[in-house]
Amino acid sequence: MTRFEGLKLKLKLKKLADKLRAIGVNNVKVKEPLSMHSSWKIGGPSDIFVEVEDVSPLQRLVAFAKEYVIPLIVIGKGSNILFSDEGLRGIIAKFGKAFANVKIDGANIIADAGVWVPLLVKLAASRGIAGIEHAAGIPGTLGGLIYMNGGSLQQSIGDTTKRIWALDENGKVVEMTRKECEFSYRSSVFQRKNLIILRARLERSLEEPNNIRRRAIDILAERKHKFPLKQPNCGSVFTNNPEIYKAAGPPGKIIEEAGLKGLRIGGLMVSPVHANFIVNVGGGTSKDAFELVAKIRDIVYKRIGYWLECEVRYVTPEGDIAPLHKFI
């Protein structure tokens, strides 16, 4: 791109940003580096970046993106995501701090998609609500956890989710039952349909708060011991596929037994602490991630005859999202 072409693009994006502000969508930035909004610290600039604090501006943003045929990606804390080095030729909408309300009534929790999962676990434990402490220490927002049907210790957030409120592709709020969410291992309908999770109702049993706190503390202690929490990473890179687990064990064990701990390409390295984590040791890129993941998968396949599948999602510059291995 020439300097003149770059200037024309910047002016065009500025006009788009002004149009968004004119319809009541605030906190708009142009060419925001996505590395600043990724737990892996990787990603080029997004053409438009918006921090949303309420449902109404998000609805207007959805309508705007549809009218102008612009890719729109909604994120929380940017964990479990790999952005391209080229960034995004579209709009990133990030849940702001105000999009994190929590209401508790008995054993029921209604929480916004932007609430920080460790805080939600703490609040639930203080009120004696059991069943989500398995998510203690998972560094993400509730929306992302539901999207991935994430969890730990053979449990998932879908086990506790009773109802979801989401925006459809027309910006209409729809209410969904647990069955309609189509939860399965690390999967949900939100990965296949154009729906934006807004909030959820979680329900489980009541229990003595101190018992729940103790379990949560034990889980946190184990996570701190097992995982490289001080270095930028995306969480677990590969899924714990039941078939592969039965044949060869969890992905961390498989990768470690292949002698790949410490394997490094560019600024990314297989963590010496836990082999299912790839850490950014400085200047890591999406290109490094592609090459390192491809090498791990190839070596593991030659050893055990199974292809490891990625849990981390890759966002293309055009706004497509899928597990990273789908692009390799």
Image (cartoon, rainbow, N blue to C red):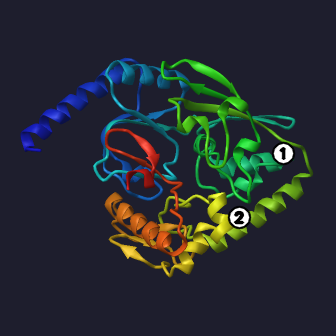
Q: Is label 1 in a helix, a strand or a loop?
A: loop
**Residue 92: x, y in percent?**
40, 37
The amino acid beneath tag 1 is Ile
Residue 165: image quadrant is: top right
Quadrant showing the C terminus = bottom left
Q: Nearer the viewer, residue 142 or 319?
A: 319
Q: Is label 2 in a helix, a strand or a loop?
A: helix
Of the numbered discs in the image, which one, if any, rests on residue 129?
1
Q: Residues within 10 Å of mark 2 (few under 14, many from 20)?
A: some
Residue 280, visible in the rendered structure: no
**N-term mark: 1 or 2:** 1
The residue lying at 59 percent from left, 35 percent from top is: 189
**Residue 97: x, y in percent?**
55, 39
Q: Which residue is mark 2?
A: 220
Q: Nearer the viewer, residue 179 or 47?
A: 179
The residue lying at 47 percent from left, 67 percent from top is: 278
**Residue 121: x, y in percent?**
73, 50
Q: CA distance from mark 1 to mark 2?
A: 18 Å
